Every structure is written in structure tokens, then in C-alpha cells.
Amino acid sequence: MNAHVHASLPHYRPTGRECELFQLAHANRLPLLLKGPTGCGKTRFVEHMAARTGLPLHTVACHDDLSAADLIGRYLIKGGETVWVDGPLTRAVRTGGICYLDEVVEARKDVTVVLHPLTDSRRTLMIDRTGEELQAPDSFMLIASYNPGYQSVLKKLKPSTRQRFLSIAFDFPDAAAETAVIARESGLDPARSGALARLARHIRALSGMDLEEGVSTRLLIYAAALIQGGTSVDAALEVAVVQPLSDDPEVQTALRDLISTVYG
């Protein structure tokens, strides 16, 4: 969990009206939910917009053990004294920044209870341990993200929570846009970046294979960086695509066959 103000604008290539919708949500003090597959640019989008608005960004990578106390804060012993230490959500509310909860459905159920008063007209955060009730300033914004295609039956965002947010659907960019992103991020030339984007299209179109998710733009950038650094295409794709996507030997073989076809 960290908080920082961006000194420079992180590169982000819009694929629709998401930048405009972000600004409208912030101007109207509305929470925002980003839905889309892993590695399609949701976090980079938030970083980009935080830099554009000049607001401090407090990012929380949600996980199974993340509790409300992790977000709000807790008493800690420092120098022999017991002191209260704000969590990232409390810091964002106090400073009027952005709190970004990445993969919010991974967090424990008590987290959503804490969020509800911040996602309606109250815009308040209750800190039971200190007795404080914080009123979020106009600049505060709550953003959450999740991957609706990768959630088990036990880990779905409840409608009562989902309907408190404006929602933007993200997906992988088209081939031309993805090629440009790969080339910019890795330094690989457009021709070889385009080949990686074509490979990604084929992998994402696969049906009947035990793939939990298609290949992310992030992994393509990793592969491109290795290739740009002198690694062979086969070796780069093995460690950046085949191995990360599946542990199943049959699926891995199918992916290698597909790579051979695209690069043959």
C-alpha cells in the first residue's frame, strides 16, 4: 500500500471516453468502478488520471486477508507509546486524494461495509476506534476495480455495492493501439510489436482450452522488453506468455504450437 503524487504524467492511451467519464465522476463527487481483464490498463489509467488532476493517489492491492482495519488504520506501539496510524483510505479522505482499491472483490466482506457511507450522499468515514467521523472533501474520490470474468461464485461484487458506483468497462485495445502501447513501453520496433499483438488476438480467441484468462497487454510488454534486449522470440514468449498463462502441459503445448503458427 502506498501513496504518492506523480511528478510526471504516466503514459496512457485512451480507448474510449474513459478520461472524460473520470473527470465527470470526480466533478460530481461520484465513486467509480473499473471492470475489465487483468493487465488491460486499469491501474495505469488511474495513475494517469491522478497525475492529470494533481491529486495524491493511495493504491491498495486487495487480497483475501485485507480487512477494514487495514484500510482505516490501527493503534501501533511506537517508542513505547501507543499511537494511532491512519490507513490508506483514511489518509485519502483526510487529504482529499484518490483511494484506489485494486481487485476489490478479493478483500474481506467487512471492507465493503466501510465503503458504503463513502459511496452515497453522506461521503463519510467512521473510525470506530477513535470515535472520529470524517467528512470527505470535494476532491476525495473512491475508485475500485475488479475482473468480472475471473471471479468465483464466492467472490462476486454484490449488487448493493456495485450499484453505488459509476462503472466503466475496460477491455484490451485493438491491434493497432496495442501495437503502439507495446512499442512505446518496451522500445521494440512496431513490426515486431505488431506480431506480439497478433499473437495476443489468437490466444484471446481460443476456445475449449483451460485458460483462465487471455494474455494481458502487460505480459506482451514483458515479452517485447526481453526481445528488445536480445532474447530470442521463442525464449521470451516461453517465460512471458506460455509459463505465466498456464501450468497445464497440454495447454502449454497448444500455446507453443500457436506461437509457431503465428511466427512460422
Image (spheres, helix red, strand yellow):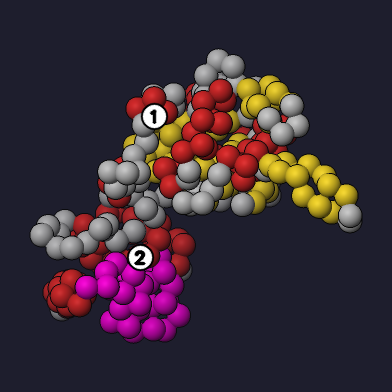
Q: Which region is colored magenta?
A: 221-248
Identify the residue at the far right of this view.
Answer: 80
Q: Is residue 45 visible?
A: no
- Which amino acid type corresponds to the residue marked 1 in the rendered image? Arg
Whether residue 205 sits left or right of residue 218 in the image: it is left
Q: Nearer the viewer, residue 36 or 21?
A: 36
Quadrant hosting residue 35 = top left
Which one is earlier in the sequence, the residue at label 1 or at label 2? Answer: 1
Q: Is residue 156 visible?
A: yes
Q: Is residue 233 above or below residue 7?
A: below
Whether residue 64 sits left or right of residue 59 in the image: it is left
Helix, strand or loop for the magenta stretch, by majority? helix
User: Residue at 35% of width from left, 77% of height from top?
Assistant: 239
| Residue ID for mark 2 | 220
What is the distance, in whole Å, between disc 1 and disc 2 at their CAs?
Answer: 31 Å
Query: Where residue 137 appears, x then y in whole percent?
Result: 68, 23
